[in-house]
């Protein structure tokens, strides 16, 4: 069940990154991130109220709050990178850094010890993620990417990965229910809010775009709920890697819905990702 939940988290995040990247090119990236976190707070608060579980401890809420800081920082830099940089550069850099760093933290600091098949799956996942998320063709290479875009992508990966969304959230106890996710949405809103307050005109967008940003935040909150439940059933490093396969989702949606063609490197990456999922499940 933990594997299914982690992959469900990846599916949700794939939708969020795809839709958020498009929205951030029509509206200010900070506004998209803020409205998304507000939407996520509504869903997380409702889920925490309805889900079974005892009263969360202060430590559980603190870990959840810390994860929200990572979310806020990660989403802002990801959307900013997507605003002025190629998605083919921003997404793979943030995805690879976001999976590699939590694995190092889990193994070196938290004592996670994956089985041999899982280690092979982790090793296979990193190049597979890069190939899936970095399509080739016109405009898809890194040649036209400014250094600032690569920095945005790296900070997004650190924010979403080690800056603590995944690592911190996994430290919350299972008896805390969904409350750590709700606490994280509060701090995520507070993290993004200062970027909007100096110029409230940044919040100007069409009603449809505002609703879409909020809806994407709700999906992102669902992704975190799935990840939290998965991390309670699997080693954190395994749950993180499985949840990090989200770049495959926009590729698959493009093929199924938009009839887009898939480049050979992406095909290799999808095959590698499928093999990695199998190995991680077996491990």
Image (tube, grey):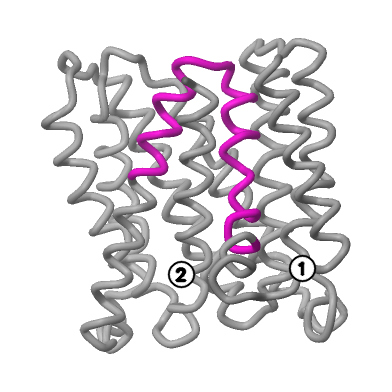
Residue drawn at x 58%, y 56% is 249
Image coordinates for residue 227, horizontal then vertical, percent: 45, 33
Residue drawn at x 61%, y 15% is 110
Label 2: few (<14), some (14–19) or many (≥20) C-alpha neighbours in 10 Å: some
Magenta extent: 222-251
Secondary structure under tag 2 reads helix
Q: Which mark is residue 19?
A: 2
Asked whether residue 224 is drawn in magenta, I would say: yes
According to the image, label 1 marks what residue? 262
Does residue 273 appear to the left or right of 136 in the view shown?
left
Front residue (pair 85, 282): 282
Image coordinates for residue 51, horizontal then vertical, percent: 18, 26
Front residue (pair 54, 117): 117
Q: Quadrant of the C terminus?
A: top right
Q: Looking at the rendering, which quadrant does residue 277 occupy?
A: top right
Residue drawn at x 69%, y 37% is 101
């Amino acid at each position: 069940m933990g594997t299914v939940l982690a992959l469900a988290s990846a599916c949700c995040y794939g939708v969020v990154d795809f839709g958020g990247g498009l929205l951030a090119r029509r509206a200010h990236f900070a506004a998209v991130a803020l409205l998304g976190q507000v939407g996520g707070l509504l869903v997380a608060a409702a889920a925490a109220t309805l889900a079974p579980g005892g009263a969360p401890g202060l430590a559980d809420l603190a870990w959840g709050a810390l994860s929200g800081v990572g979310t806020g920082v990660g989403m802002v830099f990801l959307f900013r990178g997507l605003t002025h940089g190629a998605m083919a550069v921003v997404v793979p850099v943030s995805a690879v850094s976001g999976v590699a760093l939590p694995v190092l933290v889990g193994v070196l600091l938290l004592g996670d010890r994956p089985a041999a098949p899982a280690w092979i799956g982790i090793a296979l996942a990193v190049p597979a993620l890069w190939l899936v998320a970095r399509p080739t063709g016109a405009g898809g290479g890194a040649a036209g990417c400014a250094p600032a875009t690569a920095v945005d992508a790296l900070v997004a990966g650190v924010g979403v990965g080690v800056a603590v969304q995944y690592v911190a959230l996994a430290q919350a106890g299972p008896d805390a229910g969904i409350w750590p996710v709700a606490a994280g949405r509060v701090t995520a809103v507070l993290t993004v809010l200062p970027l909007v307050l100096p110029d409230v005109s940044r919040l100007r967008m069409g009603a449809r775009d505002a609703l879409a940003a909020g809806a994407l935040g709700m999906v992102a909150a669902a992704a975190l709920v799935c990840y939290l439940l998965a991390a309670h059933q699997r080693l954190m490093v395994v749950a993180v890697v499985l949840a990090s396969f989200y770049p495959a989702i926009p590729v698959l949606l493009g093929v199924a819905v938009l009839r887009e063609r898939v480049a050979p490197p992406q095909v290799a990456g999808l095959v590698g990702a499928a093999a990695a999922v199998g190995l991680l499940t077996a491990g």
